[in-house]
């Protein structure tokens, strides 16, 4: 099992820093990345709701033109690959379900693999979900104009990662497999769910976790920061190349 390093985010051992309450509550194993992601998503949702209620037309233009992931324009507006991961639909059930799911998996996984690896895993999985939408657009041309927001791709990457870790530790994964199977089947019963995002995030997240474990194994020539930074850069480069490859058949290229 690979170990994480401290972050220094909590303001010292006396718990008096700006985030000292985290240390008082969690001790030295505070899931600071999970907390940060949750806060970013909540703040983003509040801003979305304010715009949606006060300036609905402007909100729609910003959402579809800049924030949501739209395969047909993503290469020319690359920030979409990141912004959509932290946004959610204006109905409260979307963000509520995703944040509950994040807190079911996030703290456990972050404590197992460390803060830096967990952040890299979350972001790479989210990008994998975006790539899933682009691959689908290549296979089904009507997919180029679809738009998607939400943390689901990243969360499914965390699902895959915890399966890999638990399997490596010899922990029974049957209940997790059943739970994930139910989540994969949800698009069959709930309209409007981007299942392509789920599949992409799951595949990329699982592969990335395998790479992290391989780099962190005993006897590995790569140690410390490089043990997760190197696979992160490799996966990021691969995802960029795959996205550019998919964009070769973009009708608006």
Image (spheres, rainbow, N blue to C red):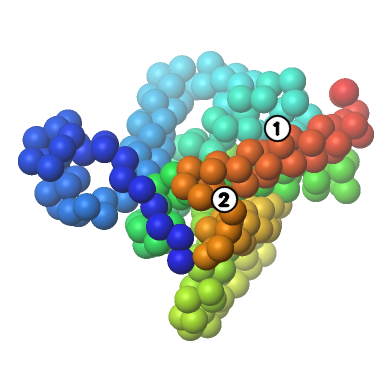
Residue shown at the point (51%, 50%) measured from the top left: 223
Q: CA distance from mark 1 to mark 2?
A: 37 Å
Rendered location of residue 18, percent (x, y): 17, 31
Rendered location of residue 35, percent (x, y): 32, 44
The label on residue 222 is 2
Q: Nearer the viewer, mark 1 or mark 2?
A: 2
Give the quarter of the figure containing the C terminus. top right
Residue shown at the point (49%, 81%) measured from the top left: 170
Return the residue at label 1. 70
Instruction: Give the camera-side residue of 119 and 90.
Output: 119
Q: What crowding class fits label 2: few (fewer than 14 Cα within 10 Å), some (14-19), or many (20 or more)?
A: some
Residue shown at the point (26%, 51%) measured from the top left: 30
Q: With respect to residue 119, does 40 lie above or below? A: above
Instruction: Give the camera-side residue of 38 and 18.
Output: 18
Q: With respect to residue 131, does 52 lie above or below? A: above
Rendered location of residue 202, percent (x, y): 63, 58
Q: Secondary structure at mark 2?
A: loop
């Amino acid at each position: 099992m690979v170990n994480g390093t401290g972050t220094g985010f909590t303001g010292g051992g006396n718990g008096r820093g700006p985030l000292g309450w985290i240390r008082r509550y969690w001790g030295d194993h505070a899931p600071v990345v999970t907390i940060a992601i949750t806060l970013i998503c909540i703040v983003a949702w509040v801003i979305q709701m304010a715009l949606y209620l006060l300036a609905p037309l402007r909100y729609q233009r910003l959402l579809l033109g800049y924030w949501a992931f739209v395969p047909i324009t993503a290469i020319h507006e690359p920030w979409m690959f990141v912004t959509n991961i932290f946004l959610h639909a204006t109905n409260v059930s979307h963000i509520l379900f995703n944040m509950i799911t994040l807190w079911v998996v996030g703290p456990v996984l972050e404590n197992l693999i460390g803060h830096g690896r967990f952040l890299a895993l979350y972001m790479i999985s989210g990008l994998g979900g975006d790539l899933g939408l682009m691959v689908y657009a290549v296979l089904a041309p009507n997919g180029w104009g679809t738009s998607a927001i939400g943390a689901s791709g990243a969360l499914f990457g965390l699902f895959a990662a915890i399966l890999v870790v638990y399997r490596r530790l010899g922990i029974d994964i049957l209940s997790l497999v059943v739970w994930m199977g139910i989540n994969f089947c949800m698009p069959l019963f709930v309209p409007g769910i981007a299942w392509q995002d789920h599949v992409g995030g799951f595949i990329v997240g699982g592969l990335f976790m395998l790479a992290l474990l391989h780099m962190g194994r005993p006897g590995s020539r790569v140690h410390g920061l490089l043990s997760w930074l190197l696979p992160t850069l490799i996966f990021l480069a691969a995802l960029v190349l795959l996205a550019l490859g998919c964009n070769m058949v973009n009708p608006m290229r």
